[in-house]
Amino acid sequence: MTNTYARDGFTYGFDFARPRSRAERIARLDALATLLDTAFILPGTNVRFGFDALIGLLPGIGDAITTAISLYIVHEARQLGAPLHVIMRMLANVALDGFFGAVPVVGDAFDVMWRANRRNVRLLREWLAREEAYWAR
């Protein structure tokens, strides 16, 4: 089922029926991880940060929001068939990020340096590469 909305010559389509390919899902997760962890550069330095650190500045709710988004990445990895040991490592990264990120000021610095979402996407990509190499034999 394809829903297309057209107005004044502008067409924007949503294709809900077509399942996403593995590569598209990985690319989407990679883009989300980049947005959360390394989207911006602190001017005058080489320090990269993302919305994870910015949203984490909100007391209480900020880290809960970013932890929920990080758990979405883990959920997608599970949907892609990642084994339990990879999922557990990803959950440990999210738990550390959520736990230390809840500490005011120091937690935000930890969010900038730990980059749990980038780590989780890297874990997923490494597992996929090993799996593809195994099945290519």
Image: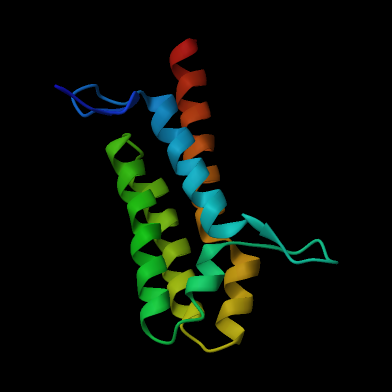
x, y percentage for residue 45? Answer: 83, 66
Name, please, the residue furthest toward the left.
Answer: 1
Observer-nearest residue: 127 or 121?
121
The N terminus: image quadrant: top left
Residue 73: where, in percent of width, then height? 38, 50
Q: Taking 89 as reference, is 11 left or right?
A: left
Q: Nearer the viewer, residue 122 or 106?
A: 106
Left or right, residue 112 beside residue 91: right
Q: Name the residue: 52% across, 58% down.
A: 36
Q: Residue at x 81, y 61 (%)?
A: 46
Position of residue 24 relative to residue 53, above or below, is: above
Here the colouring is rainbow
Which of the 4 image quarters holds residue 80? top left
- Residue situated furthest front in the rendering: 8
What residue is drawn where x is 38% and y is 85%? 60
The image position of residue 76, as x and y in percent, is: 33, 43
| In the rendered image, the vertical position of residue 24 relative to residue 97, given as above or below | above
